[in-house]
Image (cartoon, rainbow, N blue to C red):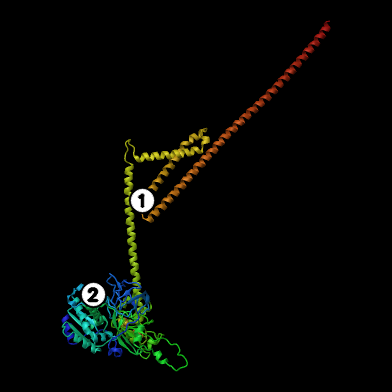
Amino acid sequence: MIIETIIERINQGKFWHFHGGIYPSEQKSITSSKPIKQLSLPKQLVLPLQQHIGRQGDLLVEVGDKVLKGQALTQSSNPMAVPVHAPTSGIISAIKKSVIAHPSGLSELCLFIDVDGEDTWKKREICQDFSKLSHQQIIKKIADAGIAGMGGAGFPTHIKVNTKPGINFLIINAVECEPYITADDLLMCEQSEAIVDGIKILDQLLSPSFILIGIEDNKPQAIKALQQATQHHEKIKVCVLPTKYPTGGEKQLIQVLTGKEVNTGTLPINSGIVVQNVATCFAISDAVINDIPLIRRVVTLTGSALAKPQNFWALLGTQVSYLLEQAGFVSEVNKTNSTPNSPQPSPPVPSPPVIMGGPLMGFSILNEQVPIVKTSNCILAPSKIEMPSAFDNNSNEVECIRCGQCADVCPSQLLPQELQWSAKAKDHQQLMQLNLFDCIDCGACAYVCPSQIPLVQYYRVAKAEIRQQQQLDIKSEKAKVRFEARKLRLEQEKIARQEKHKKAAAARKATMNKKSADGSTANSAVAAALARVKAKKAAEKIINSNEPLASSNKVTDEISPVKVAIARAKAKKLGKQENIESSLNSNKPLASSSEKQAQKHSAINEQTINDKKARIAAAVAKAKAKKFQEKKSSTEQNELSIETQSEKTSEKAQNITTEAEDKKARIAAAVAKAKSKAKLKAIEKAQQVSTTNSEEST
Ligand code: SF4
Ligand code: SF4
């Protein structure tokens, strides 16, 4: 739709409609007729370091530091980190985690300031004419002032307004559609000129074609004040809209004013639209013109449990308990049980609920010590009659009857009942498909639900879980990327190192192979000399072990060359091992500690194996030598034995010979004796015969 058509419709008082919406009881009259009240300084302020969407800044102060009003307490170069400032002068008494205003009751890092009561300002520079400031100067002033969207979202303003030219509409959200809340209403009534100054600064930054201030028709005083403040600015149009909840939703307001729908996954800037809250415009004016950072805001204290409901200028960091006290917090319980003359003390009763925000988008706070932050616009303390459900700790939730009323009123055209089932089932995938993040937490669905299902609570928990999971996924993805990068780097380093070693080895080899004057290479000469020395040593060792036999044994002399060859082989192995060790030693300066360790282990292992091998070889050689010695001893003994035996045999033979000779001699002697005896007998016989014959002759 062309811009002129839109403006023509607006001039005629015609607007578009968004889907759904509700018309709850407004209850704004409780505070809308009372001026904004200045509070006396509290004794202590508690400032969460992060009060916006994004990141917290780095601390600029420490415990014990004296700080001045408006002094920056954090800073960061990250654009998503918005600084916080001291709302008044005092001493930093603590920096610790403390409960903050959040539906989950979580704790965040907070600065505790003990207020000195002097309210001493830092040095400020008032800007007399902001039209002379450059684009970047204005952006810097907004960023340094720590301004974040004050309508509830808390998005850093300096990012949202630092956009390229070509903006069709700058929309100022002055709708404040939630029941009970009148903070913006009163601000517009009392500070319309300052708000318009802020709008002019934005105009200077963004140069939009038109500026549309959207305001509901239930704020007549504010409408009048704005119309007066803008009457001489043709470009600015105060658009009075019919009251319907939640017209103040960013997408809903854009649709009502321009007829444009901002689709899922897109931003208003994509349609040439920037939206800023009316309180943010006031903060911009304060920052750029008066050099006042965002240190205060208007807070509505309302509800029937308050004796003096009113809007207050509250310093950021003011504890809710202090504000409740100023507003005359009188609990329903105290009222009903206040019986001064009763002899019996009143029975203990549960504390009445206190809600941060409005009745539809707010949440109960469990601890009244939580502080006001940049996005806190209302503290609601209802009575039991006013909001009975807030007093009932037991859930009245019953089964969904599929009436479809929640879908009928949903301004984001979602399916609240299906979202609820998926949230209960923790089906995150299905929740994303149902566009859970298009839900603006308006609470319209829960408001109409006949089954009293706290639908928004389910959505909030589901959103928190999904965001947490996404954070974990991002962290895990980053860790994975870091791991892969490290792995790649180590591999590259390893390859580079190997290449370097290769080159160094080649260079060494070339040097070693360089021919000497006698024609031999240095390498071969040294290696041969080493081998000879080692072989000699090994041979000497073996020979020494066999010394007693070596000199006299022929067999040993025959085996010695074999032993020498074995020794030479061992020496060669030893030489190789030494080469490896020297190679490792030469790599030491290049290797990383883990690789050095690995190489060292490898070298030790190899050395251990080689030692073992050497020991085995030595044992084998020793065993062989022993065996050989034994064999030799055995041979000697055999020979000795044979000799002995031979000698014995010889002796025996001699003995036998002697005996035989003796016997023979004896036999010969006997024979000779016998012969001589026979001869003697023959002679005697012959003598006898002769005698006889003689006798006979005689
Ligand atoms: S309004 Fe309640 S009961 Fe009806 S469909 Fe929705 S969730 Fe179910
Ligand atoms: S689903 Fe979300 S956007 Fe829709 S009505 Fe419910 S709270 Fe509002």
Specify the quadrant that holds the C terminus.
Answer: top right
Question: Which residue position is annotated with label 1?
Answer: 587
In the displayed structure, 163 sits above or below 673; it is below
Which of the two residues, 28 or 189, is positioned nearer the viewer here?
A: 189
Q: Amino acid at mark 1?
A: Asn
Q: Disc 2 on helix, strand or loop?
A: helix
Corner quadrant of residue 652: top right
Question: Furthest residue to the front?
Answer: 118
Point 36% across, 50% down: residue: 587
Measured as percent of width and height from the top left, residue 171 is found at: 22, 81
- Give me the C-alpha separation between circle 2 and circle 1: 58 Å
The amino acid sitting under disc 2 is: Lys
Which residue carries the number 2 mark?
A: 141
Where is residue 58? Give x, y as percent: 31, 71
Asked if 528 appears above or below 97 in the picture, the reply is above
Report the residue at 28% width, 80% height from top. Answer: 150
Q: Quadrant of ligand 2?
A: bottom left
Point out the image quarter for the N terminus. bottom left
Q: Is residue 110 visible?
A: no
